[in-house]
Image: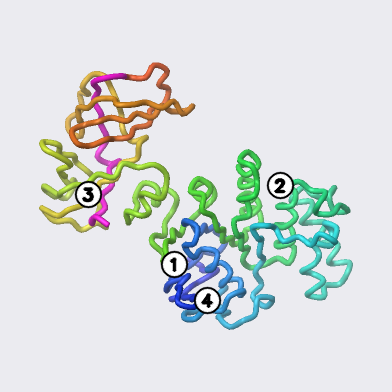
């Protein structure tokens, strides 16, 4: 793997508060990496440290193999898109985009060529003579991205650039961002607290909490195979069941989740378990099947009662009481919701085990 950005024990403090706590990970070249976590988790501080706006208290930052830990921002060759876009209100769109080129003293003809090229790529050529106040939120966002891209940075840094857009525009623009990143083959690091956004655009997701990197993985790994309870609980809706390991074999793990309630999960070679150990079993709602009659399959079938249903458009959400457990299940195409006594079942490959209760 060719690394575009590498962080080694990166730490940033503000007084007695540690905003980023010994973050260590690498960002693959030409990838779209998302820093994801709740507000105040340190993701924006980390991004701004990569940009050079904050000096690290400890650790090291490399960009394309070059140590930039003590290099000023304008010499790091990164492009930054801010949450509020930070466009100059007194400058027309053309001059906003060209600002970084003029700061670097590019010849006028080359600067104009670059501005028009990136404006064409983003579909904003017709806006070049307007002022920021005359633009919509989506148009301002494109101008901010154009300004970051026109200097041809080695790394594009995006600090929650979609948070000020309404829902429909946000979905459209995030698809555009991903497409542009792929077309240019540029490395992008994107900060967001929106789990859906992270899953939709990230090649890799770095989940942070309280200044620490909790897990790094693909969207599929983060969603279906969380390595910590925080990750499981933060990403979408999930069932987290307190369990005890009954028996482990090379292929499966049997776990007790209540009196006479034993479920089978596929063995995960990365999770070391022993008989009698406490664990947390995670099940995504869409992985659970519901039926009024007992399934013919063997194992992982529980009898329960529907306590409530919520119609959510594409799916109907069921709340099923089985023993002392309440399970959430999302079922597609449930025009006439099931009521009363039901059976819930789940494939063993869809169950994920967290080795410790947190």
Q: Secondary structure at mark 1?
A: loop
Q: Quadrant of residue 150?
A: bottom right
Query: Residue 146's image quarter?
Result: bottom right
Magenta stretch bounds: 339-358
Residue 218 location (% of width, % of height): 44, 53
Query: Could you tell me which secondary element the residue under label 2 belongs to?
Result: helix
Check disc 1 and report the residue beneath it.
211
Side of 107 relative to 207 (left or right):
right
The residue identified by callout 2 is: 138
As measured in the structure, the alpha-carbon distance from the residue carrying label 2 to the one carrying label 3 is 46 Å
Q: What is the distance, in whole Å, between disc 3 and disc 4 at their CAs? A: 37 Å
* Position above or below: 332 against 278: above
- Residue 88 rendering spot, x and y as whole percentages: 79, 62
The tag earlier along the polypeptide, 2 or 1, is: 2
**Cα–Cα gap, marks 2 and 4:** 32 Å
CA distance separating discs 2 and 1 = 31 Å
């Amino acid at each position: 793997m060719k690394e575009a950005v590498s962080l080694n024990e990166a730490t940033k403090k503000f007084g007695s508060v540690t905003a980023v706590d010994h973050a260590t990970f690498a960002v693959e070249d030409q990838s779209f990496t998302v820093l994801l976590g709740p507000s105040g988790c340190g993701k924006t501080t980390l991004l701004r440290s990569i940009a050079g706006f904050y000096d690290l208290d400890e650790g090291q930052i490399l960009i394309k193999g070059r140590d930039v830990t003590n290099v000023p921002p304008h010499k790091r060759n990164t492009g930054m898109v801010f949450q509020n876009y930070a466009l100059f209100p007194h400058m027309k769109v053309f001059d906003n985009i060209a600002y970084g080129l003029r700061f670097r003293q590019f010849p006028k003809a080359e600067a104009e060529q670059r501005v028009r090229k990136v404006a064409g790529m983003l579909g904003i050529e017709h806006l070049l003579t307007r002022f920021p106040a005359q633009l919509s939120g989506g148009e301002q966002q494109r101008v901010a991205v154009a300004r970051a891209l026109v200097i041809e940075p080695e790394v594009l840094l995006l600090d929650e650039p979609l948070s000020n857009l309404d829902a429909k525009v946000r979905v459209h623009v995030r698809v555009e961002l991903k497409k542009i990143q792929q077309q240019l083959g540029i490395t992008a690091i994107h900060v967001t607290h929106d789990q859906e956004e992270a899953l939709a655009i990230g090649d890799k997701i770095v989940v942070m909490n309280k200044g620490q990197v909790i897990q790094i993985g693909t969207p599929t790994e983060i969603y279906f195979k969380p390595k910590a309870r925080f990750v499981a609980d933060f990403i979408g809706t999930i069932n987290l069941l307190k369990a005890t390991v009954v028996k482990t074999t090379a292929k499966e793990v049997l776990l007790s989740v209540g009196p006479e309630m034993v479920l089978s999960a596929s063995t995960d070679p990365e999770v070391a378990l022993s008989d009698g150990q406490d664990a947390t079993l995670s099940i995504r709602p869409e992985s659970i099947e519901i039926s009024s009659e007992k399934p013919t399959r063997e194992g992982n079938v529980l009898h329960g009662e529907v306590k409530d249903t919520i119609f959510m458009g594409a799916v109907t959400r069921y709340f099923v009481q089985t023993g002392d457990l309440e399970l959430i299940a999302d079922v597609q195409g449930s025009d006439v919701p099931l009521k009363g006594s039901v059976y819930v079942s789940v494939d063993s490959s869809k169950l994920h085990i967290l080795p410790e209760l947190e």
